[in-house]
Image: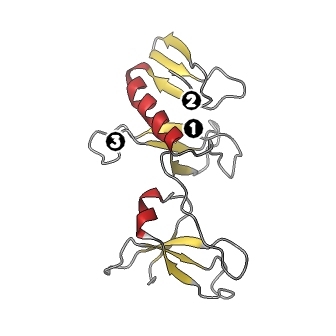
């Protein structure tokens, strides 16, 4: 088993069971129970295939901790995701670990557009679109649908949810 650094993970056994963990300094926050080893190896492979750097949470500035969806009844079973790696005061950071970020267009302000999701009940419910990143008063009202072929690679972090969107 290798940690997220790509180095051999340390192995230990306690009264609570056996597990692998990152033995590097600084740590990559890797932790895996022995009976979940195969699932984590597949999740790490999926994360490496996405060619994404190890994420850091914006609030704590620490390397995020990789987790895996373990519920067999979930459609995302075995899928990797990252959460805040701070053990004492974790923030709300969360992102999928096997996706590529959605390329956001820049608009007149020189800032990347925000990704929004249609929330109202209509034909376009749950469809993603780009809009001006400025607040309502200074918005240029830019709007563009996100390409459908990129929806599978959408990274669901800081998505603006519009109840009265398009």
Secondary structure, mark 1, is strand
Residue displayed at 48% across by 60% down: 154
Secondary structure under the numbered disc 3 in the rendered image: loop
Q: Position of residue 140 (x, y in %)?
A: 64, 88
Q: Label 2 neighbourhood size at 10 Å, few (<14), some (14-19), many (20+)?
A: many
Picture coordinates of residue 83 (x, y %)? Answer: 55, 44
Residue 53 drawn at (x, y percent): 62, 44
Q: Are marks 2 and 1 in contact (CB under 8 Å)?
A: yes
Does residue 38 sit above or below 66 in this rendering?
above
Image quadrant containing the C terminus: bottom left
Is 44 on the left-hand or right-hand side of 142? left
Task: Give the residue displayed 53% in from the left and 65% down from the top.
Answer: 159
Instruction: Report the residue marked by disc 2.
Output: 30
- Residue 133 place in picture, x, y as percent: 64, 76
Q: Mark 3 = which residue?
A: 77
Q: Earlier in the sequence, mark 2 or mark 3?
A: 2
Name the mark on residue 143.
none
Left or right, 156 with reference to 85: left
* Residues at marks 2 and 3 touching, judged by CB atoms closer than 8 Å: no
- Up/down of 151 relative to 14, above or below: below
Q: Give the residue at x 36% y 78%.
A: 124
Q: Which mark is residue 65?
A: 1
**Picture quadrant where residue 85 is located:** top right
In this rendering, is residue 56 above or below 157? above
Distance of label 1 from label 3 (alpha carbons): 18 Å
Secondary structure at badge 2 equals loop
Q: Look at the picture and state if 147 lies above or below 74.
A: below
Q: How is the image coloured?
A: secondary structure
> Which mark sits nearer the N-terminus, 1 or 3?
1
């Amino acid at each position: 088993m290798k940690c997220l650094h790509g180095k051999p993970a340390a192995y230990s056994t306690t009264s609570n069971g056996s597990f692998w963990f990152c033995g590097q300094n600084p740590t990559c926050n890797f932790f895996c129970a022995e009976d979940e080893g195969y699932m984590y190896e597949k999740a790490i492979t999926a994360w490496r295939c996405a060619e994404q750097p190890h994420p850091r949470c914006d609030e704590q500035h620490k390397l995020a901790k990789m987790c895996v969806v373990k519920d067999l009844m979930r459609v995302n079973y075995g899928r990797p995701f990252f959460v805040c790696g701070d053990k004492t005061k974790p923030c709300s950071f969360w992102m999928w670990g096997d996706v590529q970020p959605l390329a956001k267009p820049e608009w007149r302000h020189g800032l990347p557009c925000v990704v929004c999701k249609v929330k109202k009940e209509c034909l376009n419910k749950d469809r993603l679109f780009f809009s001006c990143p400025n607040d309502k008063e200074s918005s240029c009202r830019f709007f563009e649908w996100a390409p459908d072929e990129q929806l599978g690679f959408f990274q669901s972090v800081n998505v603006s949810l519009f109840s009265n969107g398009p």
